[in-house]
Image (spheres, rainbow, N blue to C red):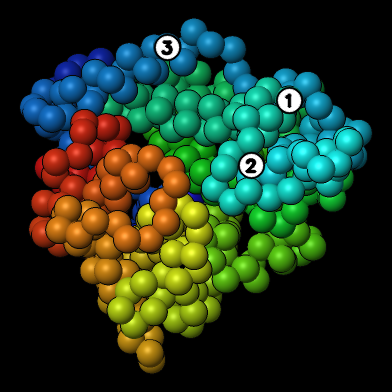
Amino acid sequence: MKKAIIYGVLVLFFSSNLKAQNKIKTIEKSQISSYSLVDYTAFFRVKERLQKTPYNAIYNKLIANADSICKRPPYSVMQKTQTPASGDKHDYYSIGPYWWPDPAKPDGLPWIRKDGKVNPLTREGSTDFETKQKMFNSTESLALAYFFSNKKQYATKVLELIQVWFVNEDTKMNPNLNFAQGVPGENAGRGIGIIEFADVTKVLTAIEILELNQQMDANTSQALRKWFTDYAYWLQTSENGVFEKNTKNNHGTHYDTQLIQILLFLNKTAEAKQILEAVKTERIAKQIQPNGAQPLELARTKALSYSTMNLRGFTELAVLGKKLGVDLWNYKAANGASIINAFEFLKPYAKGEKKWDYKQIADEEKAIKNLKELFATAGSEFNKEEYCQIGSDKKVSLHSLLHECN
């Protein structure tokens, strides 16, 4: 998420003078661009309204969270208690969340799958999953706190988190996911574990914010590009990476969102654009039906959650396409499938006009909330007032700072 083509982007230069801090300098397209999902034009509009409802409450929550994060130690793959099959703790390691010991076997091996039911043993400190998620979320929250407050301590903490996870020799993660979502008694890692790194795009957003505001040293920037170059190569050439690329459901969608933003970060714009063009026929046409249903997601035990998750991936791809001149939002496949149709299929459920009539074993209220937030995102990004209104009754969340729809 160096830098891809984007419509007008603004950069704010900070100073100790409040008036100077609020001054925005317009940068031409040829001078600077964004490799993340951030719309900086909207970001600056939000920044100007931080003292107004509902932004003030969201901002205060953001700052309180950032202050809390600053008191915590950094995160590293070296903190897990188990070691992957490689014998190297620098390798990321996790266990498939829906896999459980087989009660019919004395040793429980191999584990068996219970779709949608998370085994707590896969979410404890013995693996990297929770540590990784805390790192990604903390990095993004701190970067946003820095952007909206101009307080350098948040940028300093972001830099520490990033250096510990990606740069420092003693603590950094190796650039692969060979041992993600393994199944005890079955395999050491699987391609579908790559989806656990979908949120690495939050780190890319944080890197971008720091670099645009000259808060990252050249050595760290160079080391990060080396790490992500190696990781992108692994994604595109390893057995697990190729497997994930060829999946037909949400895994394939989020493989694309992750890889495209990394390619933009590495200034590989043409390659990123080529993948976006392929999304039309390889993802939209194959995953969405003409009526907007996503059959591969509706077949899951958490059909609403997965339909929303996959559509979020498509929405992010459409946002990236908007930046690169690939119109995925208005694209309609030969069979009539489109991203807009997928939103229209879910719209009655988001508005409360229909009760969800597919399987949803997880918290349905939370799933509806996430769906409404997705409508707000799409409404903001693609100027659809109806979608903004659908998301307008969501509870106050950080999401409202990311996509201005109020």
**Disc on res. 97:** 2
Amino acid residing under circle 3: Ser
Total of numbered circles in the picture? 3
Amino acid residing under circle 1: Ser
Q: Would you place residue 298 above or below residue 94 in this image? A: below
* 247 on left or right of 19: right
Q: Looking at this view, name the residue that lies furthest to the front.
A: 104
- Check disc 3 and report the residue beneath it: 68
* 339 on left or right of 161: left
Spot occupied by residue 395 in the image (x, y as percentages of width and height): 21, 33
Q: Marks 2 and 1, how far apart in space?
A: 13 Å
Q: Earlier in the sequence, mark 2 or mark 1?
A: 2
Q: Looking at this view, name the residue that lies furthest to the top.
A: 71
Spot occupied by residue 111 in the image (x, y as percentages of width and height): 78, 44
- Check disc 1 and report the residue beneath it: 126
Dot 1 crowding, Cα within 10 Å, few <14, some 14–19, many 20+: some
* 129 on left or right of 290: right
Q: Secondary structure at mark 1?
A: loop
Q: Secondary structure at mark 2?
A: loop
Say which residue appears at 23% left-offset and 38% top-offset. Answer: 400
Spot occupied by residue 11 in the image (x, y as percentages of width and height): 29, 41
Q: Would you place residue 219 above or below residue 329 in this image? A: above
Q: Would you place residue 130 above or below residue 27 in this image? A: above
Say which residue appears at 24% left-offset and 56% top-offset. Answer: 355
2 or 1: mark nearer the eye: 2
Is residue 128 visible from the viewing direction of this image?
no
